[in-house]
Image (tube, rainbow, N blue to C red):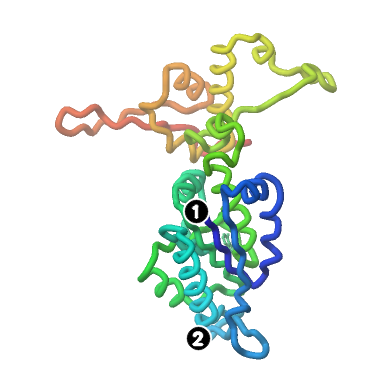
Amino acid sequence: MRIDAISIFPEYLAALDLSLIGKARTAGLVHLEVHDLREFTHDRHRTVDDSPTGGGAGMVMKPEPWGEALDAVLSRGAVEGAGEPMLIVPSPSGERFTQAMAHQLAERSWLVFACGRYEGIDERVMVDAESRIPVRRVSLGDYVLNGGEVAVLAIVEAVARLVPGVVGNADSLVEESHEGGLLEYPVYTKPPAWRELAVPEVLLSGHHGRIERWRRDERLRRTAQRRPDLIQELDVDGLDRADIATLAAAGWHVVENGATSGGASPPRFLAGPASVAD
Ligand code: ADE
């Protein structure tokens, strides 16, 4: 996978040299290039921002440096055979970044990130890019950061670890939080007792089936308690009897929606406590 990131703070992205992503780069699994937006300015002050047209607080990133930077990055990647690019613009007004989106992005051969600062990038930059390549505005969550760099660190880490070969043991990707719409089960290691706290007995039993069931139940219980929104989104048809019993103990029950059409079985969904205390 090729990744280009354009920013006025390229040093911010130096953390991508470290740890697993750094290793993936060394191993040639991820090719990452960081570009300084100011290299695409032509005035003495290397200006990248200006006041908002129509008035208002703050500053807006000018379209000219962005247009030039994207043209240069896109034509270079094309010459180097990077494949089909997708532009990702981190923004608090974008669609929410999720594990499902991380999987979608991990399928792409080339991602280009545009890190906005101030009040954002002149909208015409994205409109112009959209006339040539797919563009996604992506939000890390419902809060405002000072710029897109932290979002790029998070998105690149979440995506690159899904690229085959980046995480040594692919099994560890299967049961982690947000895979299958559930949070991860609690994990333990040695010693079996620590500060008078014991590891759950079942994990020492060596009984594979019981351990699997316990872990699944913990995922369901944790998710019900901490993220009821995720329980509401579960596909009831993907749950077994034990799942349904565990959810019932946590206050969630399968409800059949009476309205049927054409002999189809009625839609089923999970209904639970209106609000769940942690
Ligand atoms: N830039 C500023 N706030 C952001 C957020 N919440 N997500 C992504 N990019 C951002």
Based on the displayed image, in which of its 4 quarters is residue 151 positioned?
Answer: bottom right
* Three-letter amino acid code at the position of disc 2: Thr
Label 1's element?
strand
Residue 253 can be seen, yes or no: yes
Residue lying at 52% horizontally and 40% vertically, measured from the top left: 164
Circle 1 is placed at which residue position? 96
- The quadrant in which residue 15 appears is bottom right
Mark 2–mark 1 CB contact (< 8 Å): no
Q: Can you tell me which quadrant of the image ligand 1 is in?
A: bottom right
Q: Which residue lies at the image location 42% right of the left edge and 17% below the top edge?
A: 241
* Label 1 packing within 10 angstroms: few (<14), some (14-19), many (20+): some
What label does residue 30 carry, if any? none
Q: Residues within 10 Å of mark 2 (few under 14, many from 20)?
A: few
In the rendered image, is residue 57 in sight? no
At label 1, which amino acid type do we have? Arg
User: From this viewpoint, which residue is outermost toward the bottom?
Assistant: 44
Instruction: Pick whichever, 256 or 45, lies toward us.
Output: 45
> What is the x, y in percent for residue 244?
45, 21
**Label 2 SS:** loop
Frontmost residue, 238 versus 156:
156
Location of mark 2 (residue): 53
CA distance for labels 2 and 1: 28 Å
Position above or below: 83 against 27: below
